[in-house]
Image (tube, grey):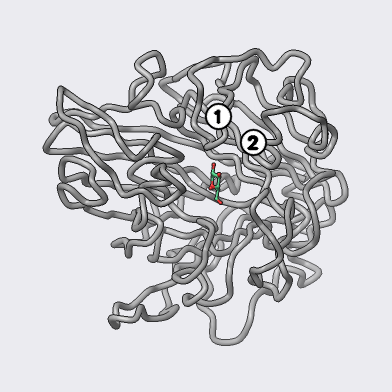
Amino acid sequence: MDMSRRTVIAAATAAGLTAAAGVGTAHASPGGRPAKELFGRLADGTKVHRWSLENGGTRLKVLSYGGVVQSLEIPDRHGRYRNVVLGFAGLDDYVAKSPYFGALIGRYGNRIAKGRFTLDGTTHQLSVNDGVNSLHGGAQGFDKRVWDVAGFTSGTDVGLVLRYTSADGEMGYPGTLRAKVTYTLNRHGDWRIDYEATTDRATVVNLTSHVYWNLAGEGSGSIYDHELEIAAARYTPVDTGLIPTGELARVTGTPFDFRRTKTVGEDIRVGHQQLLYGQGIDHNWVLDKGISARPEHIATLRDPSSGRTLRISTTEPGLQFYSGNFLDGTLLGTGGHIYRQGDALCLETQHFPDSPNHPSFPSTVLRPGRTYRTSTVHSFGP
Ligand code: GLA
């Protein structure tokens, strides 16, 4: 966070603008221990909690169900807070009809063709839940599991550790996968996600976060005016089922060129075959930096009306940019508004879709004795 943002937050606090949320909700004090409250119960009685944490001007509400970020509030250039992620007010909607709002995705972010892959000579059949393909880990992915959550403070950081153990064979994946995800808010208000996993049998893994961003505020309309920059000269074109063809195509001269900042809406109606397949943008960008040991900057999203800006850094080689194409006016969001096509976008840092069937893509194989580790940082500013 730069000085101007600090000043804005200080001014907003003095003006009482940081007073938040309804009666009966748990509040975490800035930089203090995360607070926990009961959010609801699943049909079998399992309790789902909601955690609240705040630091450096960013406020986060996280559910133990799916590790869902239900709300993420940041100030605009005048210090006015809005929740900038799509979600639901209650647990039932998350269970019944969520298009992965705010959720942790596993074991495998995005699609695996025909839900099938071969590893070390054995073919594995996964749960198929998107036509003939497997999407986001199958019918009961990590987004539909109740995670073990613990709050922590460490120095000036505040955070949550979320754990989920996926049994050998769950959704067709081999190996017992122990996943640990850490959400950290630092004193600058950056939201960092650290993913870790281990296995007892060779398997594939590709964890990500499926937050739907609208920096003007959820329910405020479309994101076509948001400005976006992505540091990638290539993307992975797909077939009609949104499975990569294997080609790493150049973005030059296509609607997929975001190397120079442009609005999301600028080229979204261009008559390009790939946009017809995705009903808009639903593609993986091949990040120029490749896999990196530390998170490196890959994308900036800015809403000119509010001035809110999101900067993303990651260790991952890919970014799935999805322009909210399947939002169709049938979901009622957190703040009481209906979500329509293009009302948010997702920027999912990841390995490439269907990597297990593309030996030329960076590998998603995890073997016993190794630890899967990736990190993504979201920084905010006016
Ligand atoms: C990802 C996929 C999309 C869609 C959304 C959720 O971004 O690539 O095709 O499934 O998740 O609707």
Quadrant (top left/top right/bottom left/bottom right) for the C terminus: top right
Quadrant (top left/top right/bottom left/bottom right) for the N terminus: top right
Residue closest to the eye, 312 or 231:
231
Q: Is residue 76 left or right of residue 210?
A: right
Element type where label 1 sits in the image: loop
Residue 239 - label: 1
Classify mark 2: residues with Cα within 10 Å, few (<14), some (14-19) or many (20+).
some
Element type where label 2 sits in the image: helix
> Amino acid under label 2?
Tyr
Q: Quadrant of residue 288?
A: top right
Q: How many marks?
A: 2
Residue 277 - label: 2
Q: Is residue 194 visible?
A: no
Residue at the location (75% across, 27% down)? 272
Q: Is residue 215 visible?
A: yes
Q: Is residue 308 above or below residue 69?
A: above
Residue 151 - label: none
